[in-house]
Image (cartoon, rainbow, N blue to C red):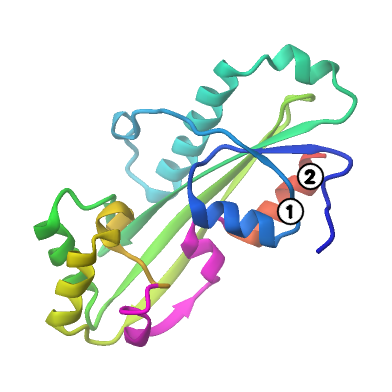
């Protein structure tokens, strides 16, 4: 695997394991910082606007903790990558399920239907101040999901910690995925193509 980060450094502003995995797969080395923001405090009508606003808020929160002046002086630029994602079902934005009942209701709704993930990626160059983001949407179509599968998923608990209770990579759910229109990396939380493009533009 080539290391593409010799001319610049990267900070991934996320504590998400899938995002770390995707950025590593892309051939980048990076350090981690997570943003502590009140996501519920940011509201937008459109999912695309919401995920972009959240990625910006995460970047701003991290920038407040960084000595940006030091980054301006450094020879090679440092890029900060932040992102966010929501699930959209029948036009409604879904975040993490509040409890097991809501998770059940969410997943039951996907059965025989479809949902979308809307994700954002924002790249900020700490040396030059360049900042640009993009969003990406993926449609996911499901076969009927049996009740016992939904119950197993909830019992196991991972679905309670993800937007919309939606985990398409999960072995229990995988057999019930009919079609994914878009890329899996985008569903996992970091769309590779826009990320690669923004990194190139930022440097």
Residue 133 picture quarter: top right
Magenta stretch holds residue 171:
yes
The local secondary structure at tag 1 comes to helix
Q: CA distance from mark 2 to mark 1?
A: 6 Å
* Residue 28 spot, x, y in % from top left: 74, 51
Which residues, given as a range, are shown in magenta?
A: 170-190
Residue 174 picture quarter: bottom left
> Mark 2 sits on what residue?
201
> Mark 1 sits on what residue?
197
Question: Does any portion of residue 99 appear in the rendered image?
Answer: yes
* Residue 57 spot, x, y in % from top left: 48, 29
Q: Residue furthest left?
A: 101
**Looking at the image, residue 152 lies above or below residue 64:** below
Quarter of the image with the C terminus is top right
* Residue 45 spot, x, y in % from top left: 32, 43
Do callouts 2 and 1 mark residues in contact (Cβ within 8 Å)? yes
């Amino acid at each position: 695997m080539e290391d593409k980060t010799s001319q610049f450094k990267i900070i991934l502003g996320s504590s998400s394991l899938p995002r770390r995995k995707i950025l590593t797969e892309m051939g980048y080395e990076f350090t981690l910082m997570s943003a502590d923001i009140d996501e519920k405090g940011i509201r937008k009508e459109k999912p695309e606007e919401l995920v972009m606003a959240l990625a910006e808020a995460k970047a701003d929160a991290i920038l407040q903790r960084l000595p940006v002046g030091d980054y301006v002086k450094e020879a090679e630029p440092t890029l900060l990558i932040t992102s966010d994602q929501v699930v959209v079902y029948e036009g409604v934005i879904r975040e993490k399920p509040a409890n097991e009942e809501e998770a059940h209701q969410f997943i039951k709704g996907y059965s025989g239907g479809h949902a979308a993930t809307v994700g954002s990626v924002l790249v900020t160059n700490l040396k030059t101040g360049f900042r640009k983001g993009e969003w990406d949407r993926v449609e996911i179509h499901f076969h009927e999901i049996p009740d016992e599968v939904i119950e197993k998923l909830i019992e196991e608990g991972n679905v309670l910690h993800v937007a919309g209770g939606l985990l398409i990579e999960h072995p229990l759910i995988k057999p019930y995925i009919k079609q994914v229109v878009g890329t899996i990396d985008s569903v996992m939380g970091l769309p590779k193509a826009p990320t690669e493009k923004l990194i190139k533009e930022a440097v």
